[in-house]
Amino acid sequence: MTGSIMRGIGSFYTVLCDEDGQEYTLRAQKKLRHQKMTPMVGDRVRFSPGQGEENGWLEEILPRKSVIERPSVANADMLMLVVASVPQPDMMLIDKLILCAAKGGMTPALCVNKIDLGGDLAEEIRAEYAGTQLRVFAASALTGEGVETLREAMRGKVTCLAGQSAVGKSSLLNALFGLELETGGLSRKTDRGRHTTRRSEMMAVDGMLVLDTPGFSLLELESMEPQDFAELYPEYNALAGACRFQPCLHDREPGCAVHAAVDAGGLSAVRWMRYRELLAEVRENWKGRYI
Ligand SMILES: Nc1nc2c(ncn2[C@@H]2O[C@H](COP(=O)(O)OP(=O)(O)OP(=O)(O)O)[C@@H](O)[C@H]2O)c(=O)[nH]1
Ligand SMILES: [Mg+2]
Ligand SMILES: [Zn+2]
């Protein structure tokens, strides 16, 4: 039978079966471990259900349409990055996640949550990412504002919510689909730290699939060639042909069209600053890649 991995705990995986719509608890066959194939939430799999009390076996992981390591998720169409309107989000983390989404075959999108707390972060972010096709939503899980628009954007797709802890990923999913996922609150008696969602989980809701993931704040870019990195910025690609040097990394090269556009105010200066900081990291890692 075939199905999708909805969640995993230790070496057990819960799979939603395509044929009968039931959930099965499975263990991964040894051969998968030998192939170094670690099942991921969102994976499409072939499996055999267990007899009676026995658990079934996960036999094969079908080819992945998309994949991202952090959060660890396969086959999402859209990676919805959630930030809160206050406090100021870590936009470097957002840029890294956008890069990982693009590399992994997911369409990045961004949602500013908690707009009931004020600020106009969504407008700021739209301006920063002009020319990138990043869709920017604004919502409040608390008041329900913007939730309908967000739900429409998710329809027919597999959407994974990702971002820092406490920005309201689980709260948004609750507001969007009437779920009862655990959310962080000050009223909790035991303090288990800032992280409420502990594991990635996929849910079938309203005819679509959505994934909730644990928050995190540190992310390292995978090693890549500096030129490949530069080409992950669509708004820079659009200008690259006009740079004096070919190819150009849009750092400090003379006659760089990206630099000129930033100076003229046509491209965001803060995004370019983050780009150059990341480029320095990518160059450093690339130099050290044989060590
Ligand atoms: N004012 C306001 N508070 C919100 C909103 N959405 C969520 N919150 C609050 O923000 C806190 C964190 O919400 P969660 O949904 O648990 O955040 P999360 O992103 O899932 O966090 P992790 O699971 O730790 O990654 C909770 O106290 C929510 O009640 C919102 O739109 N407005
Ligand atoms: Mg959560
Ligand atoms: Zn350039």
Image: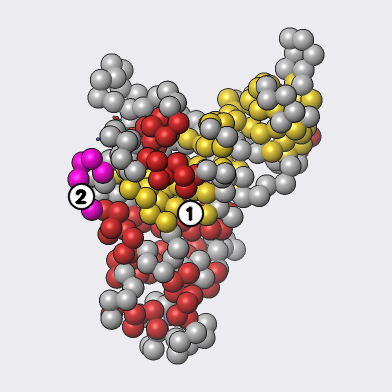
Position of residue 113 measured from the top left corner of the image (x, y, whole percent): 32, 43
61 in relation to 248, above or below = above
Using the rendered image of the protein, determine whether residue 238 is visible from the camera's viewpoint: yes
Amino acid at dot 2: Gly
- Which residue does the numbered mark 2 point to in the structure image? 119
Camera-nearest residue between 130 and 57: 130
Give the residue displayed 28% in from the left and 58% down from the top.
Answer: 123
Residue at the top extreme of this rendering: 53
Give the residue displayed 62% in from the left and 45% down from the top.
Answer: 75
Give the residue displayed 38% in from the left and 88% down from the top.
Answer: 254
Name the quadrant of the N terminus: top right
Position of residue 40 measured from the top left corner of the image (x, y, whole percent): 62, 37
- Which residue does the numbered mark 1 point to in the structure image? 108
Query: Closer to the N terminus: mark 2 or mark 1?
Result: 1
Quarter-wise, where is residue 197 in the image?
top left
Q: Is residue 263 left or right of residue 288?
A: left
Residue neighbourhood size for the residue with mark 1, other residues' Cα within 10 Å, grouped as few (<14), some (14–19), many (≥20): many
Residue neighbourhood size for the residue with mark 2, other residues' Cα within 10 Å, grouped as few (<14), some (14–19), many (≥20): some
| Residue 279 located within the stretch drawn in magenta | no
Give the residue displayed 44% in from the left and 74% down from the top.
Answer: 236
Determine contact: label 2, label 1, CB under 8 Å.
no
Magenta stretch in the rendered image: 115-120
Position of residue 202 measured from the top left corner of the image (x, y, whole percent): 55, 33
